[in-house]
Image: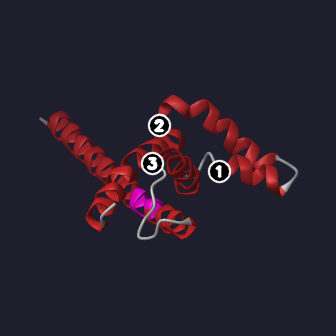
Amino acid sequence: MELHEQIIWLFVLAIPIACIAWTVTHEEVFKEPREYCVRRSKDCKTLMQRKFFYLFTCEYCFSHYVTILMLVITRYTLLLHDWRGYLIAGFALVWIANIYMSLYAFLRIDIKKERILTQKEEESV
């Protein structure tokens, strides 16, 4: 695969990674399992159990595991075609996916702020 194709794959493959990681760690559809994981991440007795349950509450942490799954499914490598390419691709995908999630969070805050301002203006009129 040519370098320009690898770069396109990097930015495109990061989209579903970001989507899955954000949905599991933030959206209402997974609210109950996430709340269970938050409780378990604080209440479990062993460090390994606490860290395992914390994984499902942090989009950055969870995006690493989603990335590993995507690398297994797609066999995507970046720059090199051996294990080093998988390693480089993994960290690059996590980085791009987390940029996408940060932008999404920023947009959501901005949209929410606009709705609140609009609602206040409508109430005052």
Give the residue at x 30% y 67%: 3
Asked if the residue under mark 2 is in contact with the one under mark 1, i.e. CB atoms within 8 Å, the reply is no
- Distance from the alpha carbon under mark 1 to that under mark 2: 15 Å
Q: Which numbered marker is on residue 27?
A: 2
Q: What residue range appears in magenta? A: 93-98
Contact between marks 2 and 3 (CB within 8 A): the answer is: no
Q: Which residue type does callout 1 highlight?
A: Leu
Q: Position of residue 8 (x, y in %)?
A: 28, 57
Sequence-wise, which precedes: disc 1 or disc 2? Answer: 2
Mark number displayed over residue 17:
3
| Between discs 3 and 1, the one toward the N terminus | 3
Left or right of 64 on screen, residue 37: right
Residue 36, picture quadrant: top right
Say which of marks 2 and 3 sits in front.
Answer: 3
Amino acid type shown at disc 3: Ile
Is 32 or 7 nearer to us in this picture?
Answer: 7
Q: How crowded is mark 1: few (under 14 residues within 10 Å), some or many (20 or more)?
A: many
Q: Which mark is residue 55?
A: 1
In the drawing, does residue 17 fall left or right of residue 124? right
Q: Looking at the picture, which amino acid does disc 2 mark?
A: Glu
Magenta-drawn stretch contains 13: no
In terms of depth relative to the viewer, which is nearer, 57 or 91?
A: 91
Q: In the image, what residue occupies the spot 47% across and 60% down?
A: 94
